[in-house]
Image (tube, helix red, strand yellow):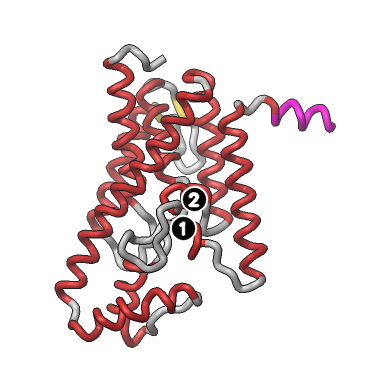
């Protein structure tokens, strides 16, 4: 039994294995500290760059934080499923470079889109409410609070301005894009699709859904769709650069 478990673990390539371990440790720390009233996402999640809660290291640390069990389960399953194949093809160094660049690219596009959303809100909201959000919003978020439902516009702006974005989804979507480009005709068998689908069609379809969802910007949708698209976009650019230089494999 122990030999079986060890052999399964050792079959995971080193970078993927270590990323999995780091994510699980961060997730465990999040729940342990939550019991003590500490929201780790306020410190390690990615905040808007003008927020009082922003720290430069969050550009990296947010990639190892998650907002719930299903969030981390989906991301880690996709990392294991696609990442182990890509690391075997590219080797540890190139895989890690790809993973980090797509994660950083996801954060870049997410922050850029967030900036335009915030500017729009600042220009349309009454000045006194804007002042209150800018002066008190970060303190509320740091105490796991927000403006009440009577001031929903202020609450929404505060979440944009001072809320934390967490997750490895941007880098994971980069992995999905890479798999679809390197193995376009491999058929994927997915639980929510009753028939096999080629990787290239799955990637294109998922990308289209993310683009539509990001543009639609439905109320109550807390998913960072443009971060997902950012991971795919930067992954596409990086793969094209490697292919042009003859360094893809």
Q: Quadrant of residue 50?
A: bottom left
Residue beneath the point at 15% across and 75% down: 124
Vertical arrangement, residue 75 with respect to residue 224, above or below: above
Q: Distance from label 2 to label 1 (Cα)?
A: 7 Å
* Quadrant of image for the N terminus: top right
Q: Which residues are magenta?
A: 1-9
Where is residue 63? Give x, y as percent: 47, 47
Vertical arrangement, residue 177 with respect to residue 106, above or below: above
Residue beneath the point at 34% across and 77% down: 155
Q: Is 234 placed left or right of 36 in the picture?
A: left
Where is residue 96? Give x, y as percent: 48, 31
Vertical arrangement, residue 13 with respect to residue 42, above or below: above
Residue beneath the point at 31% across and 35% down: 234
- Name the residue tied to disc 2: 61
Number of numbered discs: 2
Where is residue 36? Give x, y as percent: 66, 72
């Amino acid at each position: 039994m122990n030999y079986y478990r060890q052999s399964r673990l050792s079959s995971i390539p080193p970078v993927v294995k270590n990323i999995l371990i780091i994510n699980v440790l961060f997730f465990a720390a999040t729940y342990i500290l939550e019991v003590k009233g500490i929201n780790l996402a306020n410190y390690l999640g990615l905040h808007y760059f003008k927020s009082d809660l922003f720290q430069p290291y969050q550009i990296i640390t947010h990639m190892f934080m998650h907002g719930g069990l299903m969030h981390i389960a989906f991301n880690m399953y996709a990392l294991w499923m696609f990442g182990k194949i890509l690391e075997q093809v590219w080797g540890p160094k190139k895989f890690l470079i790809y993973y980090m660049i797509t994660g950083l690219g996801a954060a870049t596009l997410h922050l850029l889109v967030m900036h335009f959303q915030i500017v729009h809100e600042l220009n349309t909201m009454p000045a006194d409410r804007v002042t209150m959000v800018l002066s008190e919003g970060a303190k509320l978020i740091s105490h796991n609070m927000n403006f009440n439902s009577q001031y929903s516009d202020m609450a929404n702006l505060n979440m944009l301005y001072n809320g934390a974005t967490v997750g490895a989804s941007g880098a994971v979507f980069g992995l999905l894009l890479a798999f679809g480009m390197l193995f376009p005709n491999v058929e994927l068998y997915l639980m929510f699709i009753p028939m096999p689908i080629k990787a290239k069609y799955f990637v294109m379809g998922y990308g289209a859904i993310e683009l539509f969802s990001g543009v639609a910007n439905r109320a109550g949708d807390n998913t960072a769709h443009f971060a997902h698209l950012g991971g795919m976009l930067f992954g596409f650019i990086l793969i094209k650069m490697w292919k042009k230089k003859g360094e893809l494999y």
